[in-house]
Amino acid sequence: MLSDGEAAELLSFLTLGTRPDVKAKATEYILGLSASREGCCFLRSKPDLVSALFALTSDISVAIAKDCYHIIINLSADETLHQVLVSDGKVLPVLLKKLLDPDYLFSDQICTILSNLTRHERTCKTVFKALQEDVGLAKLVDIFCTEGYNAKANLHYLGPLLSNLTQLPEARHTLMDRDRCVFQRLLPFTQYQASVIRRGGVVGTLRNCCFDHTNHLWLLSDAVDILPFLLLPLAGPEELTEEENEGLPVDLQYLPDDKKREADPDIRKMLLEALLLLTATRAGRKALRDKKVYPIAREFHLWEKDVHVSAACEKLVQVLIGDEPEPGMENLMEVEIPEDVEKKLKELDAQEQEELEKEEKRRSETRTACAK
């Protein structure tokens, strides 16, 4: 790794006024450094280098600016560098301002950086605060939902960014403001086929919002009507009885023979987790039963091959067909669990995960053997 003297010399090359060929060599070298854990560790101790690199994202050379953005992406993937970027580097106001520019060339890189920075709660709070001060979550959703907002960038990583932000209660509160129609704009993207990243980000956002049980009735009401958007990606072409079809939301009745389910197992699992969260209250369970969620879950379980997704579906089915909890325990999110019981449940959950991993490995080995 570089000595302090060598690092100082390298820093002197990272200015807007330096010869382009010298800058290019310097940024190319640091790009290689940022791709390794040791390199990131070194750069964490050199905040001046990081600040200089960020300044060069405004270089007139597209190649140099692109290299610098890729360096920042690599650094933002390392949680230990987050404070260097947001505090020492002060990157957030600049990134958010450029994200608003519909002609900015590197908006996709900005989306990736912001998505990386919001993976962990501490920095996520810092990003959300800056976002609310400079842009606003509603504007971010507006950009996300405006097809072709930036002709030079697809902005798909705004989806994971929204999902990460909604790990925060304050972000969920803002997104689900009942006096505005912000949350509802995201719903159609559960079926967005052009990008699994965008689609997965939205489903993750909806799932996170379902943690707030006080909003369940609103989410299930006609004002939002979240249920069809969660169910439709899980529904297949199987023929249901007339009674089952008539009870389903209109969009799920009498689906065509070529109806395809969501292809990504992680997204399927998040959809099931969102539905399970909606069963936390008595009113939510009643709504899902009245809307015939069980037949969709039943057919889905017969179709599903991924053991983890199948296990998530089984949990949902158990709630839908099970007996109602005793009085005083109707809200499953507010039930106080004794410490010893909680410990036992965690042990059982870890055991279940281990069994699922073994089953997944066994199935994989069986498929491999059959392919030979």
Image (cartoon, rainbow, N blue to C red):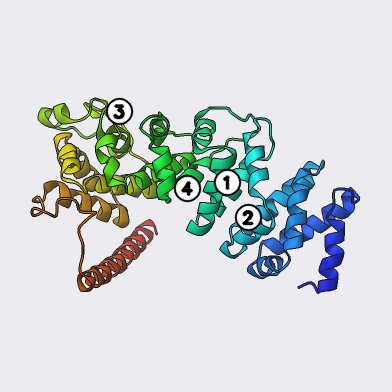
Looking at marks 1 and 3 on the same chain, the residue that comes earlier in the sequence is marked by 1
Q: Which mark is residue 165?
A: 4
In which quadrant of the rendered image does the C terminus lie? bottom left
Q: Amino acid at mark 2?
A: Val
Depicted 255 relative to depicted 269: above or below: above
Q: Which mark is residue 86?
A: 2
Q: Is residue 322 visible?
A: yes
Q: Quadrant of residue 133?
A: top right
Looking at marks 3 and 2 on the same chain, the residue that comes earlier in the sequence is marked by 2
Q: Amino acid at mark 1?
A: Ala
Q: Which residue is mark 1?
A: 130
Q: Quadrant of residue 72?
A: bottom right
Q: Which residue is mark 3?
A: 223
How many numbered discs?
A: 4
Query: Viewed as shown, does residue 31 lie left or right of 332?
Result: right
Q: Amino acid at mark 3?
A: Ala
